[in-house]
Structure formats: C-alpha cells, structure tokens
Amino acid sequence: MKEEQGREGMNRRDFVKGMVAGGAGLYVSQRLGAKGSQAWAAEPADIGQCKSVKVTCISETSWFDNAQIMADIMKAGGPTANQYAVKWHPKNAGGYSALVEVEALDGTTRRILLDTGWNPAWMDYVFQREGIDDRLRKNEIEFLYVSHEHIDHFWGLPATLKYRPDIKLLVSNRYYPEGKELIQKSGFKGELAELGPGKIHRLFPGCASATFDIPIMIRVQGEQALFFNVKDKGLVTVTGCCHMGVVTMLQYGRDHIQTGGKLYGLYGGLHIAPFEQWDAKLDPLISGLADMKMQQVAANHCTGLIAIQKMQAAGIPVVKGTAKYGSRSELYVGNGDTVSF
Ligand SMILES: [Fe+2]
Ligand SMILES: [Fe+2]
C-alpha cells in the first residue's frame, strides 16, 4: 500500500514538475509574444462592432478526477504523450463547451457553439439541459467553433453532429491526421473552414478569430480564440484553454484589432493551474493579468481554483457563479451559469 502511495506520489511530483516547467515556459513565451507582436504589428484590423456578447457555460467540467487524468497521461509517457495513444479512463471523461450569443448593432442575435466536449453521454446530458439539442436541430446556431484539438474540446464532435451534421465547422489548420480523420468518421457533412495563423479572421461584424501556432501538451498544435469588439466597452475574448497564455492573447488582441486599446472582459479556460499546482513562477501571470485592468474576468475550466483565488486576491474582477451541475465553487462562472459583456 505504502509503495503504491509512493509510486503515485512520485508520478504526481513528476507530472506537476512538468506542468510547472510548462507554466514557466508559458510566461517566457508570453513575454516573447509581446515583443514579437510589436515587431511585426500591421495596422490593427477593423472588425466592426457588436452591441453585446452573452456566454452560457454548457460545461466546464472536462473530466471528473484530476488524479485519474494525471495518472492516465503519466502511464502513456507524460505531457509529451500523443493524446490519441493514451488509454483514457472511460468513466472520467466530461467535456468543455459554451454557447456564445452575439447581439448585433441592429438588435439581431447570432449564435456560436464553442467546442463540443469529449464524452458523448455527458455532452448529451449538458446539451439537453441547456437546450442546445433544439437550437442545433432548428438551425439556430450558425457554426461550431472548435478552439483546439484536445480531447475535452474536440473529441465529442458526434454529440453536435447527431443534431446537425451539416453545421459549418471552424477549426485551426494545424490538426494532426488523426484529428482530420475524426472529423470525417463523425459523419460531418457541412462546410469546413480551417483558419491559419498570422492574420485576423473576421467572422461577422464585431467578431473575429486568431490562431496561435504553439505546441501544446499531449501532442496538439495550435489554438484559436474568439475576439469581440463590443460597442462602448472594448475587447472581449472567448477561449477554450488559452494554451497560448492569457497575457499573450490579450496583448495580441489589443495590438491587432481596432478597439481603441480597451480590454474589457474574457470568458473561458486560462490554463494557469489546471491540476491545482502552484509555483511562484506563476505569480507574474496573475500580476500581468491584473495590469490589464479588465472589467469582467469569467475564467473557469483549466484555470484552476487556486488561480481564481489568487486573481481575486490581486483585485481582478472575477465573475462569480452558482456552483451547480458539478462545478466546484461559486467563486467562478460554472456549468449552467451565464455572463454578459
Ligand atoms: Fe487544452
Ligand atoms: Fe481543456
């Protein structure tokens, strides 16, 4: 028993060491990202404006047990393992997804489904709970926007396609062959848009996407994020995991999109302490985010409760939730909660 605990302890220590090293690397890349974006900054893009953005958290519970998912990854070789080769514990899968409703200047509403989760049974439950199944059937959702190829954001594609196989699908152009095959095998019959890095993709007035071409743990390349220019408020970002780093992403948006330099709010995972580890090397991320002077920070999923608490202590206006349907704390926007910008 003791040996087993020791073995698990060693695994956890190794894993956390790898993750913190990744976190430190993340901060370095954020600083480089800031320099880099200044070096090649073109004229900021005019993406137009929208009146408001409302985000409903369909699910931020990607898995149920941190220790189990860490053990699965360690058994496959650690953070550099190929996600398609990991033997995932079948009962630990949940999924990440959000409904983004954008009010145009003329008062009409456009809807985006952000990410499609992981476990089809969990996604059935959360989609039905939030009425996403009906909205998909009635064609009230304009497109499915998948932030990145990670298991908990992308593998649940059949859960969306069963209601709307011909939905328009927006992914980054950095997917591995297994990911492209998954799209075909899921019965996808719609239009596929593969968005590449190095430019702002205007999706509709007030809404744009940018792809960050970065290597991500368990062999994923690149993540894309949504940027909104909200009239009289400023820039609002919506992310899956934000593996590119929240400071990098916000600086990129501020430098490349016309908003008068105003950063207003964000929704989504921030990948700061997903496994609730903390290291002093992560402190500058919190102070960097505080320096951004955002008005509403709705962080959840892989941000980590410990990171949320540190944000609040640093005076960042963290949006609170109701801790229902499996979300762990009222300190953040969780399952079934909404936030409006
Ligand atoms: Fe991720
Ligand atoms: Fe994630």
Image (tube, rainbow, N blue to C red):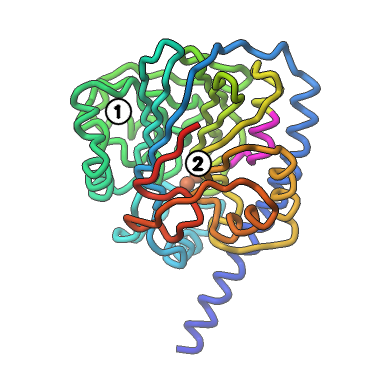
* Relative side of 327 to 331, left or right: left
Residue 339 percent across, percent down from the top left: 45, 39
User: Which quadrant holds the N terminus?
Assistant: bottom left
Mark 1 beta carbon near ligand 1 (under 8 Å): no
Residue depicted at 35% across the width and 58% down the height: 326
In contact (CB < 8 Å): disc 2 and disc 1: no
Q: CA distance from mark 2 to mark 1?
A: 28 Å
Mark 1 nearby-residue class (10 Å; few <14, some 14–19, many ≥20): few
- Residue 131 in the image: state x and y as whole percent: 23, 37
Which of the marked residues, 2 or 1, is nearer the chain's N terminus? 1
Q: Decide whether residue 7 is among the magenta residues.
A: no
- On residue 254, the disc is none
Please name which of the two marks, 2 or 1, marks the residue nearer to the observer: 2
Q: Position of residue 82 (x, y in %)?
A: 48, 48
Q: Is residue 219 visible?
A: no
Is residue 209 among what the camera can see?
yes
As drawn, is 142 to the left or to the right of 199? left
For label 1, the residue is: 184
Kindly state the secondary structure of the residue where label 1 is placed: helix
Label 2 is placed on what type of residue? Answer: Gly
Secondary structure type for disc 2 = strand
In the depicted view, which residue is nearer to us: 113 or 178?
A: 113
> What residue would you read off at disc 2?
268
**Residue numbers of the magenta segment:** 243-251
Q: Say left or right for 45 vs 34.
A: left
Counting the numbered discs, the total is 2
Residue that appears at 61% across and 56% down: 307
Snapshot quadrant of residue 183: top left
Which residue occupies 36% across, 15% down? 108
